[in-house]
């Protein structure tokens, strides 16, 4: 075992990333990929870490248990195969923004249209906010549409009309990234 998926969550506060990075540094574990966010006072992160060959799963679990004790975070670990660890992340080629009156079913309607076309969602972020016009829902998706961009635009135009939201699609430019 050389790569592990970690899921970590807890009450948001300054220093969480530092605390996790410090625990992993003491194990000489390299953080290869990560995604972190705070939602309504809760912090969550997912990381893929690479362990040196001389670190056992038991040593990792002991270090993570000490981290939980010290920080009151919740930590879950899952070994991943070498094949999974070497699989490159999908690169998004489009960003989709969705906004409109908050209601049940927006995420499903948009992601169902994408899944039906075989389009992968690489990242998604949603937020509900109060405004002068009522409760507004916003969603931003990064997707890997490949050669399905025209079909995606048509399908999402249909979704927008059906559920009463605004949908904008932007092609990502590699030069900007």
Image: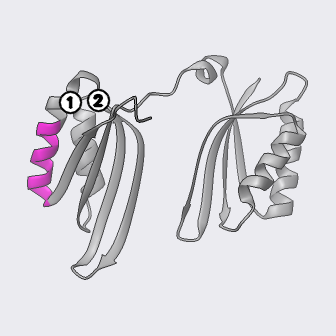
Q: Secondary structure at mark 1?
A: helix
Give the labeled residue for mark 1.
149
Query: Which residue is rendered at x = 62% and y = 61% of the image?
Result: 43
Task: Decide whether the magenta segment is chiefly helix, strand or loop.
Answer: helix
Q: Indicate the position of residue 132 as horizontal and vertical percent values.
A: 25, 82
* Furthest residue toward bottom: 132
For label 2, the crowd category at 10 Å Cα-Cα, with few meaning under 14, some 14 to 19 and many 20 or more, is many
Residue 5 against residue 65 in the figure, above or below: above
In the displayed structure, does residue 93 sit left or right of residue 72?
left
Left or right? Give the position of 14 relative to 69.
left
Q: Is 68 part of what is drawn in magenta? A: no
User: How dense is the environment of label 1, judged by Cα within 10 Å: few (below 14), some, or many (20 and up)?
Assistant: some
Residue shown at 84% from the left, 25% from the top: 52
User: Which of the 4 image quadrants contains residue 17?
Assistant: bottom right
Please give the name of the residue rendered at 72% of the width and 51% of the height, measured from the top-left corner.
75
**Which span is picked out in magenta?**
153-164
Q: How is the model colour-coded?
A: one colour
The tag on residue 59 is none
Tell me the element at label 2.
Answer: loop
Classify the position of the C terminus by image quarter.
top left
1 or 126, nearer to the observer: 126
Whole-number angstrom distance, CA of label 1 to CA of label 2: 6 Å
Residue 1: percent from left, percent from top: 77, 23
User: Going 11% across and 46% down the picture, which residue do you hit?
Assistant: 157
User: Pointer 2: what residue?
Assistant: 145
Q: Position of residue 140 (x, y in %)?
A: 35, 51
Q: Is residue 91 above or below residue 170?
A: above
Q: Do tag 1 and tag 2 residues touch (Cβ < 8 Å)?
A: yes
């Amino acid at each position: 075992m050389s790569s592990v998926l970690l899921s970590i969550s807890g009450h948001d506060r300054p220093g969480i990333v530092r605390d996790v990075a410090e625990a992993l540094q003491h194990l000489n574990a390299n953080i290869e990929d990560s995604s972190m966010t705070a939602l309504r006072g809760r912090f969550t992160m997912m990381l893929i870490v690479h362990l040196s060959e001389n670190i056992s799963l038991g040593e990792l679990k002991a270090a993570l248990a000490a981290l939980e004790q010290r920080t009151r975070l919740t930590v879950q670990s899952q070994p991943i195969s070498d094949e999974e660890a070497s699989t490159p992340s999908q690169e998004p080629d489009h960003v989709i923004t969705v906004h409109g009156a908050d209601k049940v079913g927006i995420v499903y309607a948009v992601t169902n249209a994408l899944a039906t076309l075989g389009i992968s969602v690489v990242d998604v972020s949603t937020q509900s906010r109060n405004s002068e016009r009522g409760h507004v829902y916003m969603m931003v998706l990064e997707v890997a549409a490949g050669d399905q961009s025209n079909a995606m635009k048509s399908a999402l135009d249909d979704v927008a009309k059906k559920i009463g939201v605004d949908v904008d699609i932007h092609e990502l430019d590699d030069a900007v990234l």
